[in-house]
Image (cartoon, rainbow, N blue to C red):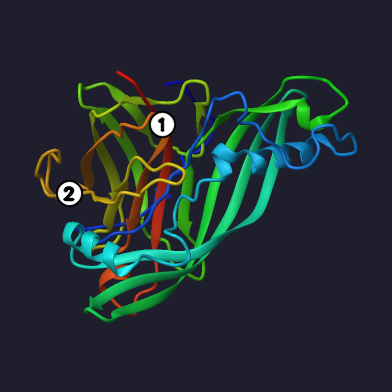
Amino acid sequence: MKNTQEKGPAMNAKISFLGKLALSAALALMVFGCEDDRYAYYGDDYTTDITDEEALQDIFLADADVEEPDVWQDGSEGINAAELRSLDEEIEPLAWWRIGHRQRESVTVDFIDDDHAILTRVRSFDGRFRLLTDMTDDEMVTIDKPMYNDLVRKARAVRVDDSPYPRRNWRIEAITAETMESVDPNPNTVHILNMTDIHSNGRLIVDLDEPLRTYFDRESLPYVIQGEEVVVFVEVEGNLPAPIGMLRPNVYRGGRLPRLPLHDDGVAPDETEGDGIYSGSYVAAQRRGLHHIGLDFIDDQTIYDDEAAYDASGWAIPYRVIAD
């Protein structure tokens, strides 16, 4: 894996969580590509009447591998009853999901020099956080909480040509993970401090503590091999009771969105109960290509107190599944 660190103070995403993990949600995680056609742009590539800044904004927002996957929501229609029953068997005691829409807020372009730029995209994801509290054969009892999130991702762009057509002159060569944080009027008390993703044979895939300052080269994303076990360790801090943690592996455009618990209970692969380091494992998909590992943490009271406000944080980290 190639990744580089931008100089600057650590930017730790916040999050809290405790005890027994319970629930299901939907997390779709970012997808980055290295195919020849991955750089699709808005408008006409041969337009000359825009600035480099405008061209870079267009390139970022029109990059299907970066912007098209729906990372954090299950869809505005929620989850049907059959799915909830199956999830409830796996993740106790409640089911939950996010209902909302991602809205672009801004893409900021900072030129390092004439040939290099850093892009920062901030997008809102607002709507409802829905808790399933009971379900019978003919009805679901739910609680909806107002939900406000910011989704942030950075990219590094390089000039590849000096033609008269600004959109053709730039390429996104590296990208960060995406962060999700609940924002005002919601609180944000949960902090993700570090994520270490270890291959079953002991090979380190990703060790990440500054998601918006660590750039993944799109030509050499972290990789796992089809059908092999991946072990994930995540260090978090937050209020007590500790946050609820979810692992969302193998998420890909149009695919099923698995949700697995992350535990801090001292049961393997977790090493020490109550130390704030949560762990989980999963088997890498057989489907080769781009996937994401999603870390989704929700304050305990968001789940277990019907009066408590929505409070959550998450990271979405790209990787590739390859053949053995």
Residue behind mark 1: 319
Q: Quadrant of the C terminus?
A: top left
Q: Quadrant of the N terminus?
A: top left
**In the visual, does 2 lie left or right of 227?**
right
Q: Secondary structure at mark 1?
A: strand
Residue 26, image quadrant: bottom left
Q: Residues within 10 Å of mark 1 (few under 14, many from 20)?
A: many
Taking depth in this image into account, of 301 and 240 the one nearest to the observer is 301
**In the visual, does 92 lie left or right of 98?**
left
Residue 201, image quadrant: top left
Above or below — where is 187 with respect to 57?
below
Q: Position of residue 98 (x, y in %)?
A: 42, 64
Point 73% across, 42% down: residue: 42
Q: Position of residue 267 (x, y in %)?
A: 9, 44
Kind of residue at badge 2: Asp
Residue 108, image quadrant: top right
Q: Which mark is residue 277?
A: none
Taking depth in this image into account, of 7 and 143 the one nearest to the observer is 143
**In the visual, does 27 lie left or right of 262?**
right
Q: Give the mark nearer the N terminus: 2 vs 1.
A: 2
Taking depth in this image into account, of 256 and 308 the one nearest to the observer is 256
Taking depth in this image into account, of 139 and 131 the one nearest to the observer is 139
Above or below — where is 83 with respect to 142?
above
Kind of residue at badge 1: Tyr
Above or below — where is 241 with respect to 225?
below
Q: Which mark is residue 264?
A: 2
